[in-house]
Amino acid sequence: MMTLDLSLWRWALLLMVGGSVLIGGRGACAQPAPGPAARPQPGIDVQDYDFSLTLSDTTDRIEGTATVHVRIDADTLTAVRLDLIGRAPGGETGMRVRLVSEDGRAVSYRHADDLLRIRPPDLAAGQTRTFRIEYAGVPDDGLIIGTNQHGDRTFFGDNWPNRARHWLPVVDHLSDKATVEFRVTAPARYEVVSNGALVRDSTSGGTRHTLWRTDVPLPPKVMVIGVADFAVDTAGTVDGVPVQSWVYPEDRGPGLKDLGQGPPILRFFEENLGPYPYAKLANVQSTTRYGGMENAAAIFYSETAVADGEDDTSLLAHEIAHQWYGNTVTEADWPHLWLSEGFATYLTGLYLEHARGAAALRQYMTAARRQVVQFHDANPDTPLVDTTYSDPNELLNTNPYQKGGWVLHMLRREVGTDTFWRGLRAYYERYRDGNASTRDFRAVMEDVSGQDLEAFFDQWTRRPGHPVIEGTWRHDAAAGECVVTLRQTQDEPPFAVPVQVALGESPSRTTTLFMRGREAQSRVDCPRAPWSVTLDPNTDLLAELSMRRAQ
């Protein structure tokens, strides 16, 4: 996912080599009201959802039926709990449940405090139970019903982080992944896009009936539908996977051009990370409140970011990368958001490196480093893995995005580029269709590299801050040496980091000083005084750096 503030976004486009990046701002859409995160529901594991939804042009009320297949994992369970935002007394929005049944027989339930508690008889561990929930209401969030920038009516799911519960009865936590099916009944003038593969699409009597299904388990945050008047095009096929573009008819020309960049990006990630996990890739213009939202196999992009005359390469690369990390390998809980957003941020940089050269990655990482420094100045006590949040939206900041990307960049330097790519592929394979924590990722990288990475991960994911390194150098003519002295001046304890030093000579030379404490000094052969000495010439270190010649 990429958040979007348009005024800052234009500035970021220039810094980020024509791409977009999380700034920490927001788009024009209203943002979710703050509130507690939905919790996992212990004792159950949802295996599959089958949602049947009826949409209308005459009302924002939806009619829904959810068939939920649940595995029971605990003998002490007395109720199966699902998240579903209810309708408050006197309120106009929220869902009301009409009936819960199992095998055609009514089942006792209670819908209160935004939880649907289903109480069937004889619950026991090892069972798989199937419940049919009939409900209706006007969603206050989650399914955004309104008009697009052209004044046309649209329906778009926008679930991140846990807003699916506004319109779907689910375990609305990213750790409970399930396959999903959407059966949508809507006016015939609309096209319907969703996760997975299209199973059926037909019209009769002015009504469209569409069925989409994915056989790959997904977290609820990326289970969506998009219903609107679309122009649809296939931009290409990558290893049998159709790459589609869905845009508003008014934006057909520039919109299809913008979203048509998908095939080479998909091919790059598939070649380096592993097989693409879904039946298709649809890039969709939408009313999402974010710059892009990585819904599985149906990525939604802000309507204001598509067909705007700007280069959307980075935006597409970020969201397509999420299909591997975020959707297929999903973070275990919200504090590990960097395993999704940091991966997508850095993989965007790696695509730019592939497509435009090494200088593009250096420029990209330099801009990201500035953002990390600015965020740390305002939030000096916030580590990358932050457990202090109350609402997951609070985690949408520079840390999981740009700092997460920087941690991966430094990890690549730590283990070597070939080993880094092998580690990413192994991580994807080991946790495919499941969930992983920072500790899990570290264990994979240790297995692949043969290195002990505990100190590296503790320093960069558990501690706040980064080194501030001030360097001086002088030329000792008598010894024919340059004396280089580095000092860490940040308030936090010293970091253990390698610092590359470049000597301006012909030809230029580099040497590396490893700092383990506040100060490090090295003497380097210099028969003549170099015209300059600089730190981190290849943009390999997350640090604030300065160097001057000693008087």
Image (tube, helix red, strand yellow):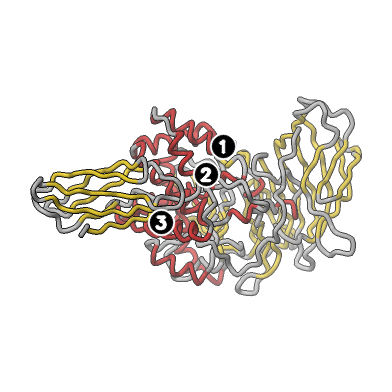
Q: Amino acid at mark 3?
A: Arg
Q: Is residue 189 above or below residue 266?
A: below
Nearer the observer: mark 2 or 3; the answer is 3
Q: Nearer the viewer, residue 294 or 405?
A: 405
> Residue at left 59%, top 45%?
335
The percent coordinates of residue 482 (x first, y second) are 17, 49
Q: Quadrant of residue 274?
A: top left
Residue that numbered label 1 is attached to: 436
Nearer the observer: mark 1 or 3; the answer is 3
**The N terminus lies in which quarter of the figure?**
bottom right
Q: Amino acid at mark 2?
A: Leu
Residue that numbered label 3 is attached to: 369
Q: Secondary structure at mark 2?
A: helix
Q: Nearer the viewer, residue 191 or 446?
A: 446
Mark on residue 339?
2
Check whether the beta carbons of the residues at disc 2 and disc 1 lie within 8 A of each other: yes
The percent coordinates of residue 179 (x first, y second) are 66, 40
Going from the N terminus, do you reach mark 2 or mark 1 first? Answer: 2
Going from the N terminus, do you reach mark 1 or mark 3 first? Answer: 3
**The C terminus lies in which quarter of the figure?**
bottom left
Q: Secondary structure at mark 1?
A: strand
Q: Amino acid at mark 1?
A: Ala
> Residue at left 33%, top 50%?
487
Disc 2 versus disc 3: distance between alpha carbons? 18 Å
The percent coordinates of residue 56 (x first, y second) are 76, 63
Check whether the beta carbons of the residues at disc 1 and disc 3 lie within 8 A of each other: no
Q: Is residue 335 above or below residue 54?
A: above
Mark 2, Cα crowd under 10 Å, few <14 / some 14-19 / many 20+, is many
Q: Secondary structure at mark 3?
A: helix
> Residue at left 80%, top 55%?
63
Q: Would you say 382 lies left or right of 59 here?
A: left
